[in-house]
Amino acid sequence: MAYRVGQGFDSHPLVEGRRLVLGGVQIGYPRGLLGHSDGDVAAHALANAILGALGEGDLGRHFPDHDPRYAGADSIGLLNEVWKGATGKGWRLVNADLTIFAQAPKLAAFLEPMRVRLAGALGADQSQVNVKASNPEGLGTLGRGEGMAAAAIVMVEKD
Ligand code: MG
């Protein structure tokens, strides 16, 4: 059995006039994440972690942010595309673990729906995906609510 681990990180600014989508879940909030796609930092961090495990660079290389095909893209779809590339090479998910860094809103009620959406994009059982939230307690740019960030780690295996 071969095993690989990968880590991913992403951050986007929070701005007015955008919907907030985290882990594929739309959250009612006056501001949303600014990005070429829907700005979903959790889906992007997880996709980057998968690409890292495969030794295949990063999300920007596979889905360039100047490519009009990905304008406003549903990042769960991008994550699913990345995962199809992994399964096409015989990789299976062992587990994934994510942390979202956000001062507000409170994310506790959304963590389970995010887990369902992210696991679904990977064709995985929910028990293989964990989503956590960390409050920066007012520290720095994330603590001022100027943006959100997410970190992810994954392990994959193949025969
Ligand atoms: Mg991103």
Image (cartoon, helix red, strand yellow):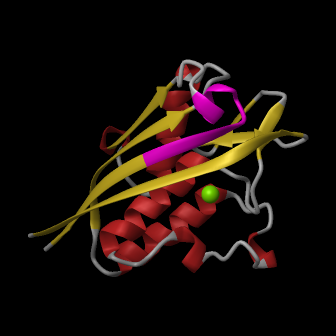
Q: Nearer the viewer, residue 158 or 20?
A: 20
In the displayed image of the protein, which residue is found farthest to the left?
1
Q: Does the magenta segment cover residue 141?
A: yes
Q: Could you tell whether 103 is left or right of 130 in the image?
A: right
Q: Could you tell whether 16 is left or right of 53 in the image?
A: right
Q: Could you tell whether 46 is left or right of 7 in the image?
A: right
Q: Nearer the viewer, residue 121 or 2?
A: 2
Q: Residue at x 42, y 42 (%)?
A: 98
Q: Taking the image as four quarters, which one is ligand 1 found in?
A: bottom right
| Residue 76 x %, y % | 60, 56
How many badges with numbers are in the image?
Answer: 0
Please state the extent of the stretch shown in magenta in the rendering. Answer: 140-151
| Residue 67 x %, y % | 76, 79
Q: Quadrant of the N terminus?
A: bottom left
As displayed, is residue 81 above or below residue 16? Answer: below
Q: Residue at x 34, y 51 (%)?
A: 153
Q: Quadrant of the C terminus?
A: bottom left
| Residue 44 x %, y % | 55, 56
Q: Residue at x 49, y 40 (%)?
A: 116
Q: Nearer the viewer, residue 81 or 41?
A: 41
Q: Could you tell whether 72 is left or right of 48 in the image?
A: right
In the displayed image of the protein, which residue is found farthest to the front?
140
| Residue 74 x %, y % | 70, 58
